[in-house]
Amino acid sequence: SPPSARARETVAALPAPRVPPEAPARPWLWPAVPIVHAVAGHRRHRGSAPRVAPVPVVSIGGLTAGGTGKTPVTGWLAARLPGAWVLGRGYRRPGGGTDARIGRPGIPPTLPLGDELEMLRRRGIPVVSCPDRYRGAWLAAEAGARLILLDDGFQHRRLQRDLDIVCIDARWPTGRGLIPVGTGRETWRALDRADFVWVHNVEALETPWSVPGPGAVLPQVRSQSVPDHWRWGPDARALSSVRGPVVAVAGLARPGGFLGQLADQRLSVTRVDLRPDHAPLDGVPSDAVMTEKDAARLPEGTARALVCRLEVSGAGPLLHRIRSLVGDPP
C-alpha cells in the first residue's frame, strides 16, 4: 500500500544519513575562510599569558563546533575522578549574563546553568557555569574541587591547562569545512597542542579511518555511544519499556545519531520534531522521547529521555595521567 501522509512527513523531516559525506557544507563561502580564521586567531592569541588556576585543569575540546562528544567524555571522566568539577561557559543558558553559577548534585540551581552542565549536574557531578573560565576555576576550587574538567576548552587560551584532550567524531571529522563553510574551528595542525585524542564512532564507519597529521602519533582513546536505559522522573527504566508510537524531539547539532538509535530500538516514530541546537523546547508532547541533553532543558523528571553509556577502550593511560596531576594512585 502507498505510504501514509504521516509516514511521508516523517521521512521528509529526517536529517542527512547517519554518516553523510564530508563534502563542504557551504562551498561558496571558501573565500571568507582566511579572513574569519585570521580574526579568530588574533582573538585567541591577544592579551596576557594564560592564567593559572589553583588546582589542575584538564581541557576536553574539539576541532569542530558541536557534535563531537565533548560533554559525554567530560561526564565519563568526572564519574571516575574523585574531586573533579566540570567548568563550562554555560552556552546559551537562559538569562544570559556573565555571572558565575554553581550547580550541586541534588540541589536545583537558582539560575539555569545551560543544558549540558545541567545534564551533568543531574548525573551527580558538581559544575560551574561561568563565561569567565578563570573566575569559574577559582570558585570551583574554593568550593572543594581537586581537579577541573574544562568542557569545550581547546580554543580557550586564557586559562592555563595541564592536559589537553581533543574529541573527534570519525563520522564527521572535519565538520564539512572550516567556519563559515562548515563547523571546523581549526585544522589538523592544531593537534600539535594536544596531549590525547579521543575518537568516537569509528565502528560506525564502513571503511577504516585513522586520525591524520600530528594526531596520528598521539595516544588515543576510542569510544562508542550505546543506548543504556530510559529515564522518566527519578526512575531508570529498561530500553524495552518504551515502545511506539512516539514523537522524537531533537535539539542537537547532529540529530541523525539519535534518530538512528531510535531506529535500532525498533521504535515506531510517528513524527520527528527537529529544533536548533540548544534551542528552547516549548510545546513538547507528553509522549515525546528525546536525548538526555535535551531533557535537561525541561523541568527535572518531566521528559522521557534516552540515556546512553560510552563503551570505551584505551583510556587507562589517560586516567593514569590525570590522576597523577592530583597525586592520586593509578
Image (cartoon, rainbow, N blue to C red):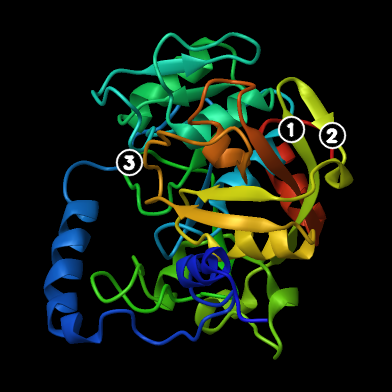
Q: Which residue is mark 1?
A: 231
Q: Amino acid at mark 3?
A: Pro
Q: If you read the primary sequence from the N terminus, does the residue marked by circle 1 or circle 2 appear first?
A: 1
Q: Amino acid at mark 1?
A: Arg
- Give me the residue at 63% from left, 24% from top: 122
Residue closest to the eye, 104 or 156: 104
Q: Is 112 positioned to the left or the right of 285 in the image?
A: left
Q: Amino acid at mark 2?
A: Arg
Q: Which residue is mark 3?
A: 50
Q: If you read the primary sequence from the N terminus, does the residue marked by circle 2 or circle 3 appear first?
A: 3
Quadrant in the rendering for residue 113? top left
Q: Nearer the viewer, mark 3 or mark 1?
A: 1
Q: Which residue is mark 2?
A: 237
Element under disc 3: loop
Q: CA distance from mark 3 to mark 1?
A: 41 Å
Q: If you read the primary sequence from the N terminus, does the residue marked by circle 3 or circle 1 appear first?
A: 3
